[in-house]
Amino acid sequence: MGLVAGAGSTALLDAFGGGTGQVVRVGSGAVSVALPGPRLLVLDLHPGPASLPCAVLAPALATVVAAGAVVVGDEVMINSFGLQLPSCWVQVSRWWSPARVLPREPGPASPRPADPGGLDAVTWRALRAAVSALAEHDAPATADLLCGVLGRGPGSTPAADDAVAGLLLAAQARPGPGAAVLDQVGRAVTAAAAARTTPLSAELLRHAAGGLATRVVVRALHRPTEGNRAAVRALGASSGAATLAGADLVASVRWGRLAA
């Protein structure tokens, strides 16, 4: 059995207490491992600014995957030292901290009109209503509206989920809603996502509720230049545009109502 070095995200520390998982997806760029909880861990074969907060960075594993030695259904043993697959051992030799949004003074509402970013009309109306409720510090109404659209759209991260993640992240990047309100909303979304959407999307929503995302997304929220926003739009077929749609709704808020 070969040995592969890996670097684990500190957001996954609680998942390395021991247990058994299973490989559920194998791609040229990543291997997804389902863990009890339910949780999802991604072995990232090509780390970079778009690496997910639930990733173990393991570029040396790419050779093993290319040889067909990792397949869907493989059992994975996990402990505090790393992950054992049938074909190799991924030793977590160091830890890295994923990007986190930081609260900033909001200033005036953004002059940029919020764009649906390809979201369907039902999702867009619900998100607009959710942001209005959030501006009024109404956590239950916000949570109900966001949970109601989870899972809408195709893909491993449905577009509605990407927009909800963008909304949660952007809300945490400004002090307006208040930590207690956002915590209540985030916990509700995290709990609902496990049953309403895909494992990967549920995991990313869990981290978004805690303010964690890829460096590309966090950079665009902190400094929304056209270049930084273009880098987000390049994520996936629709993920980036949907993420920006949710974030832009928060930026368009004048507390108590949406900008025209």
Image (cartoon, helix red, strand yellow):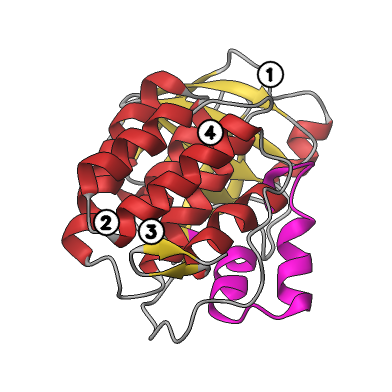
| Residue topped by disc 1 | 71
Q: CA distance from mark 2 to mark 4?
A: 22 Å
| Residues under numbered marks 2 and 1 in contact, where contact means CB atoms less than 8 Å apart | no
Which label's residue is closer to the chain start, 1 or 4?
1
Q: Amino acid at mark 1?
A: Val
Please state if 38 lies on the left or on the right of 253 as rendered.
left
Element assignment for label 4: helix
Residue at the spot of label 2: 182
**Residue ID at (51%, 69%):** 251
Q: Nearer the viewer, mark 2 or mark 4?
A: 2
| Nearest-to-viewer mark from 3 and 2 | 2
Q: Of the two numbered discs 3 and 2 on the same chain, state the one appearing first in sequence.
A: 3
Residue type at numbered disc 4: Leu
Secondary-structure class at tag 1: loop
The image's mark for residue 200 is: 4
Q: Position of residue 143 (x, y in %)?
A: 30, 40
- The span shown in magenta is 213-240
The 10 Å Cα crowd at callout 4, few under 14, some 14 to 19, many 20 or more, is many
Q: Say the numbered circle drawn on residue 10.
A: 3
Above or below — where is 119 with respect to 114?
Answer: above
Q: Tell me the distance, in whole angstroms, between the alpha carbons under discs 2 and 1.
A: 39 Å
10 Å neighbourhood of mark 3: few (<14), some, or many (≥20)?
some
